[in-house]
Image: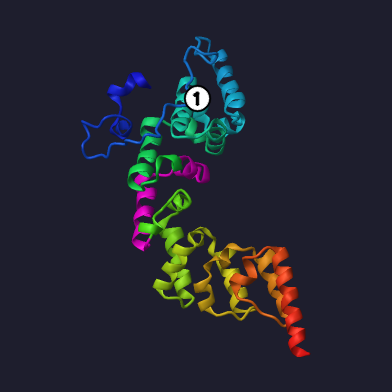
Amino acid sequence: MISRVQNLPPWNLFLFPRSSAPSLKVLRNPNFRKPRFTISLNSQFSDHSDAGLLFRQKILYLENHLHVDFRKAFRENPDSRSATLSAVKSVEVCLSSMGLELSAVGRVLDMYPQLLTSDPDYDLYPIFDFLLNEVQIPFPDIRKSIVRCPRLLVSDLDLQLRPALKFLRDLGFVGLNAITSQTTLLLVSSVEHTLLPKIQYLENLGLSHKDVVNMVLRSPALLTYSIQNNLVPKVDYFLGDMKGDLSELRRFPQYFSFSLERKIKPRHRLLVEHGLSLSLSKMLKVSDGEFTARLLEMRLQSSTADG
């Protein structure tokens, strides 16, 4: 890879002086370091003339070094069968240079075998450049972003990532609410088919646009939940069985992050059974033990008041 510096495409210039690309921001991060898993081409994985031996070396590299299921990789990405070992190693070098440890590299490649035949210069470094210089994720947090959402590495920059970033920033994900390594997974969501429909669903409940924006800024995970499998059943239970008011959802949007069957319904039914009530936050945010203790205390207070 180093020998190709003179012919690197513009995307890779963020790793080198950009005298020829003044429009791009130069990456000057003191934490940027050389790959921790640099592999010499003269190592035990060296290319040999025998095709069968080369193929076997690649299988051993995938299976024993990266812990990638090579059968799955070859099945889902047939081109990886004919990819050279040095090309596959360049992908590991790229990912490790951005802070991913070997185990994380293996998990990412096992999850998305198409990356095994990617060209780091054209397919991967542009994504890292986008995260560092456009989303402005600090270098130490790049690893967190990728580990939380490896799909970032296989998403189209112009068709997916940039439109999602613009939509989210227009929505209010700026300043203190800016996208971080915790919320970069929102960037892989389709604006038209995922993000916008969820905003519209919440507004159709009777919440104002301002209310909905405040809700998703306080609980960004709202934009990751399925409308049919999460939002609809929880709203139906809240408005129906719980006879709740939308204002409480506005105050506590984290309601949607709790399991309907394992937490919301059981706790609500216990309260109803004893003629008691709690706000959503007090009902859900505490552990099972704390909820049981709170319920007992409320029952005692209720019986004392009746007496």
Name the spot of residue 216 as percent of width and height, x first: 46, 64
Considering every residue shown, the one lying at the far top of the view is: 49
Name the spot of residue 2 as percent of width and height, x first: 36, 21
* SS assignment for the magenta stretch, majority: helix
Q: Which quadrant of the structure image shows residue 10?
A: top left
Q: Residue at x 43, y 55 (%)?
A: 190
- Which quadrant: the C terminus? bottom right
Considering every residue shown, the one lying at the far bottom of the view is: 307
The answer to whether residue 26 is left or right of residue 152 is: left
- Which quadrant: the N terminus? top left
Q: Which quadrant of the structure image shows residue 196?
A: bottom left
Up the image or down, 156 lies above or below 248; here it is above
Highlighted range, magenta: 143-172
Magenta stretch encompasses residue 273? no
Name the spot of residue 14 as percent of width and height, x first: 31, 34
Q: Nearer the viewer, residue 47 or 182?
A: 182
Badge 1: residue crowd in 10 Å (few <14, some 14–19, many ≥20)? some
- Amino acid residing under circle 1: Phe
Up the image or down, 64 lies above or below 273; here it is above
Up the image or down, 255 lies above or below 125; here it is below
Q: Which residue is mark 1?
A: 37
Is residue 274 visible in the rendered structure shown here?
no
Q: Residue at x 50, y 46 (%)?
A: 149
Name the spot of residue 279 as percent of width and height, x first: 60, 75
The answer to whether residue 178 is left or right of residue 101 is: left
